[in-house]
Image (cartoon, rainbow, N blue to C red):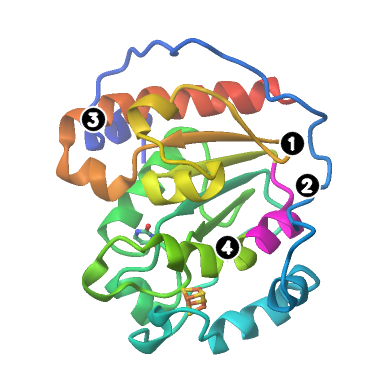
Amino acid sequence: MKRDELLKEMGLGPLWKLRPPFVKPSGPPREAPSLLSAAADERTRAIAAMGWAELRQAVAECTACALHKTRKQAVLGVGDIHAEWLFIGEGPGAEEDERGEPFVGQAGKLLDAMLAAIGLKRGENVYIANAVKCRPPNNRTPEASETAACWPFLARQIELIRPKLIVALGKPAAQTLLQQEVTIAKARGLVHDFAGIALIVTYHPAYLLRNLPEKAKAWEDLCFMRKTMAGLG
Ligand code: URA
Ligand code: SF4
């Protein structure tokens, strides 16, 4: 797809300004994050020692929260396990639950277009995961207890990938990573620090599909991500 077509698909024109402030994350880049608290329980410790194959099996068999009851299959994530970019969504929807891959429905098409807009492609230097690995019934927002139960898996993915930049798509992902209540409006346009890794927050593509005017802000955020990554060297 050409850039102009992409911008059109996103409902956007060609000229966009980057939003200040542009802040580098504190701490050395690409240092191994320590995500395991001293009080971690046995399950969390076990997950923190897993490799990819074990992780895949563990989420497939996981019954740590109620979402396991209604899933067809758990969806671990997809992409380059050595990626510099890590995108984190909310949780699988119907198509993802069916196919076992994140962001393959309508929101996924928009995410792919967003990636292409900044020269990225699913699977190439990009990994895509979700805050919860099992589909919430009727695509409801995952509860805090569910994102908490699923967190050790995401934490281990982050630790194994050690991306340069994490992009949280939407509120559940942002809150999971920032460990506080946030609004996207306030949290976007900043480089947050996640265990020494740069973290940028933006709107979820499913939200953008329902709120077309926000696509312009999403485009600003994409430019900001690209600029931030360039600054990370
Ligand atoms: N929305 C998400 O947050 N994740 C998916 O995988 C699909 C839709
Ligand atoms: Fe386990 Fe996560 Fe699925 Fe809950 S959502 S059952 S914690 S894999």
Work out which quarter of the rendered image holds the N terminus and state it. Answer: top left
Q: Give the range drawn in magenta.
A: 155-163
SS under mark 3:
helix
Instruction: Mark 4 or mark 3: name the one nearer the start of the chain.
Output: 4
Disc 3 residue type (three-letter): Glu
Image location (x, y in percent) of residue 73:
43, 84
Image location (x, y in percent) of residue 81:
69, 59
* Residue 77 visible to the viewer: no
Disc 2 residue type (three-letter): Pro
Tell me the CA gap for discs 2 and 1. Answer: 6 Å
> Between tags 1 and 3, which lies in front?
1
Tell me the CA gap for discs 1 and 3. Answer: 29 Å
Residue in the image at 60% along x and 23% along y = 228
Disc 4 residue type (three-letter): Trp
Residue indicated by mark 2:
33
Q: Counting other residues with Cα less than 10 Å from the Cα at mark 2, is it few (<14), some (14-19), or many (20 or more)?
A: some
Q: In screen coordinates, is 88 left or right of 92?
A: right
Image location (x, y in percent) of residue 49:
81, 71
Q: In the displayed structure, would residue 128 be above or below residue 223?
A: below
Secondary structure, magenta segment, majority class: helix
Residue indicated by mark 1:
196
Instruction: State yes or no: discs 2 and 1 in contact (Cβ < 8 Å).
Output: yes
Tell me the CA gap for discs 2 and 3. Answer: 33 Å
- Asked if the stretch drawn in magenta spans residue 129, the answer is no
Residue indicated by mark 3:
214
Q: In screen coordinates, is 12 left or right of 173?
A: left
Q: In the displayed structure, would residue 179 be above or below residue 74?
A: above
Q: Counting other residues with Cα less than 10 Å from the Cα at mark 4, is it few (<14), some (14-19), or many (20 or more)?
A: some
Instruction: Mark 2 or mark 1: name the one nearer the start of the chain.
Output: 2
Residue indicated by mark 4:
151
Tell me the CA gap for discs 2 and 4. Answer: 15 Å
- Give the tally of numbered discs: 4
